[in-house]
Image (cartoon, rainbow, N blue to C red):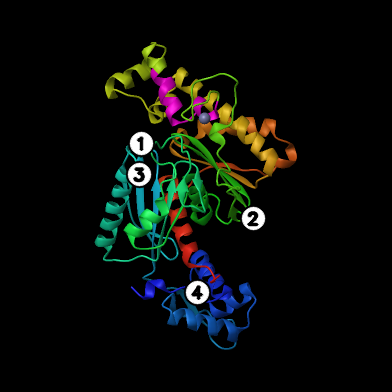
Amino acid sequence: MKRLAARPENRHQAQILSLLRDEGAMSRAELGDVIGLSRTKVALEVDRLTALGLTENAGPAVSRGGRRSTLVRLAQDMRFLGIDIGATSVDVALVDGELRILSHVSQACDVRSGPRAVLDTVVALAGKLRADAGVPDVYAAAVGLPGPVSFKDGAPVVPPLMPGWHHVPIRDLLSQELGCPVTVDNDVNIMAMGERQTGAARGAEDFLFIKIGTGIGCGIVLGGRVHRGVSGSAGDIGHIRVEDYGPACACGRTGCLEAFFSGAALARDATLAAKASRSTHLADLLSANGRLSAIDVGLAAAAGDPVAVELVREGGRRVGQVIAGLVSFCNPALVVIGGGVAGLGHALLAEIRGVVYRRSLPLATENLPIVLSELGATAGVVGAGRLASEIVFVAPG
Ligand SMILES: [Zn+2]
């Protein structure tokens, strides 16, 4: 228990830990080169980290001439919890120091059932993962929520999809119940960092991650860091007004992007089309399943159903318009599309690409890949694992 309170003692030790997380095992010589420290000084800092139980020896390094160097890696028993609370599901994963997923559970859970019920589910799933792995304690945990989060307060603020969650101190409650330090962020931000860690945006310094799920959000990564804005609501693009009139949005306004195109909007439009007998394919799916989801629209579109194809096109066009504006605004190196509706795949991607390439200036788009998420459903827990590691890998003060 005492060892889990171990923290780096200075900036160089924190840098060494972050490097070992992102690059895996390194020799002392390589660490010295990257950080700009002498071999003697690196050896001293690594010895301290090993004494603290944060790093360990990983055998001899390939010789670069001269004295043989040894490889250093993060302590192999280091564990973090990555938690991703979505609108309709909860994912919890146990990851090691290098953010490899060791075990992962996903459970259906409606965020509208309120914070108490959802946190009970999170704590139960985390307890089960830790018991199964024989790991009673973790260094830290981080959690993503599907709504605006005040990062410094660790609490959601007027989240449209989450009635009853406003200002509930999620960070402090979970920290108490999990017995470790906790950070809370918006789910799109943690997914963006997950893609940067091991997915489609690996190593990218400036990129946008667009999540199209029940709602729509954008993770903005600039200079390798999430840009959260002054109160934490940066990237909340789902409520950008794209028309003066339109369907009612969960936020209470009309004309919002996500009221036109999102998982919820697709399900609504597909159901209307099925009931009005405009699509026999969707009508068949509705009578077979009793309800329609974005996945059904994807299936129908893939089967060539013209109504479903048009829904995907129209949605891609609207999202593409907003992304084109964002590209002009911040000139990213890459745009990654993720979230459940990204399962609509290449038809959606083609539409978004077409609009963005047509509408943004050539200088901003000539080397701009627009790609689908590589991590899919695990982007959130990997990114949350990274955020949890940042609680630990910081210099004091
Ligand atoms: Zn809205």
Please name the predominant secondary structure of the magenta segment in the image.
helix
Furthest toward the bottom, the residue is 67
Q: CA distance from mark 2 to mark 1?
A: 35 Å
Q: Amino acid at mark 1?
A: Arg
Q: CA distance from mark 4 to mark 2?
A: 24 Å
Marks 2 and 1 in Cβ contact (< 8 Å) = no
The stretch drawn in magenta includes residue 269: yes
Q: At numbered mark 3, what does the secondary structure look like: helix, strand or loop?
A: helix
Q: At numbered mark 1, what does the secondary structure look like: helix, strand or loop?
A: helix
Q: Amino acid at mark 2?
A: Gly
Q: Quadrant of residue 102?
A: bottom left
Q: At numbered mark 2, what does the secondary structure look like: helix, strand or loop?
A: loop
Q: Amino acid at mark 4?
A: Pro
Question: In the displayed structure, does residue 338 sit left or right of residue 241?
Answer: left
Q: Badge 4 is on which residue?
A: 8
Q: Residues within 10 Å of mark 3 (few under 14, many from 20)?
A: some
Estimate the x, y position of residue 26 in percent, counting from the top left.
52, 74
Instruction: Judge depth for marks 1 and 4 and give the one in front.
Output: 1
Estimate the x, y position of residue 1 in percent, counting from the top left.
33, 73
Near-viewer residue (25 or 115): 115
Q: Is mark 2 within 8 Å of ligand 1?
A: no
Q: CA distance from mark 3 to mark 1?
A: 8 Å
Q: Badge 1 is on which residue?
A: 112
Near-viewer residue (341 or 261): 261
Q: Residue at x 59, y 84 (%)?
A: 41
Q: Residues within 10 Å of mark 1 (few under 14, many from 20)?
A: some
Estimate the x, y position of residue 203 in percent, counting from the top left.
58, 57
Q: Is residue 253 above or below residue 169?
A: above
Q: Badge 3 is on which residue?
A: 115
Magenta residues? Answer: 256-271
Q: At numbered mark 4, what does the secondary structure look like: helix, strand or loop?
A: loop
